[in-house]
Amino acid sequence: MQALQKKTPDTLLVPDLNRHPEAVPDELEALCYQFLTELLRKYHSILPPAWYDGRSDSAVGSTQLAPYNPNNPNAAGISSGGDSPVLRELVYNELMGLGKTEAAAKEWGAVAAEFELVCGQKGSYTRADVMTFLIHLRKRGLLQSTIEKDLKAIKVVARVQGWQFPKLPLRRMNPDEVRRTIFAKETVGSLITLGRQGLLSRVELCYLALATTYGLRRIEMVKLNPSHFPDEHHLVVDTAKGGRRTIHLIPPQIAPYLAHFRHYEPDSLTHLFHRIARKSGLSTEAGYGWHSIRRSLATELSLTRVSTLNVLRFMRWSETSIQREFGELPIYAKRDQERIDREIFQSHPFLPYWQ
């Protein structure tokens, strides 16, 4: 095991056989998954372009292995038979330089790589190229909301390469087409109950406690490290989407589970969620993830007597989005996070399952 620790990248988490023997099978599974992910990123040779970013596309075609160039370890290098694609690297570097999250940079970079595979490697692209990619996305059966999100990545390509992204009179999206997956309150309660009965490992219970208590987004989980748990009573969350850093209270019901925290990268967190669901006998279709729990928590809290403003602040929505709903009120209403947390915990839909 010591030899394995020396040869694997620093980001890999080697299970401790002495401390948690009951968690070894699950952690070995996660280790193998993460190792393969890091290996694919290093040698960038496998299609679909974002196999490790949660995207899938069987219609892209076949590939050839792209040799690894240590002098140019870009994030794009997927070979379709000739030159190594570069759009993934361009988009990734652009977004990282602008201060976006690495998860977003990787996701949009994957879209750019897919665009390049469909339209070829060029110094600039035309309206015809964009329409070809748009047809490709529609043939994949993607929702209109997903298509519009993917086109934003191509707009980044246009900005970096210096060409004009064409005006596309896309049809207005029907609200029914926006698919926001959500779990029923009873389903979340079942996940917690079964997990506490020994179905889940300590690490899995830790992340389930974080998700069901605070509605953490995946990117907020990725940003967590041991320093975000300064003591057994407080959790520091680097809020996503431009929100402020939030210092939450830790309710006593979940404190023992958070003691087993360990950091995971985005891909491993997605894998972790689906493993929890699978162990609990929950069949999750495409689109389900940690955010499905967040939506469930927000829905249940909105049905309580807690003020809507405090719900939004507890769920860490940005001040800009809150002001759109409440105007100047958030500016004048002092934010007392501890008081907000205590009020939320009194009406929290999922905390009773952790007692």
Image (cartoon, helix red, strand yellow):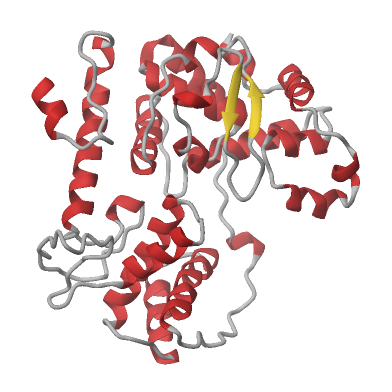
Q: Is residue 187 something that shows in the picture? A: no
Seen at 16% across and 62% down, the residue is 71
Task: Give the side of residue 60 with respect to residue 222, left or right.
Answer: left
Relative height, residue 308 to residue 46 (above, below): above
Relative height, residue 355 to residue 213 (above, below): above
Tell which of 82 and 73 is nearer to you. Answer: 73
Seen at 47% across and 43% down, the residue is 288
Relative height, residue 64 to residue 44 (above, below): below
Task: Please provide percent x and percent y for residue 249.
Answer: 66, 20
Identity of the residue furthest to the front in this view: 71
- Image quadrant holding the C terminus, namely top right
Quarter of the image for residue 274 reads: top left
Tell which of 69 and 142 is nearer to you. Answer: 69
Task: Please provide percent x and percent y for residue 344.
Answer: 74, 24
Task: Please provide percent x and percent y for residue 91.
Answer: 40, 67
Seen at 25% across and 35% down, the residue is 10
Q: Is residue 231 something that shows in the picture? A: yes
Counting the numbered discs, the total is: 0
- Image quadrant holding the N terminus, namely top left
Task: Give the side of residue 218 with respect to residue 344, left or right.
Answer: left
Quarter of the image for residue 339 reads: top right
Seen at 20% across and 39% down, the residue is 35
Task: Please provide percent x and percent y for residue 327.
Answer: 88, 52
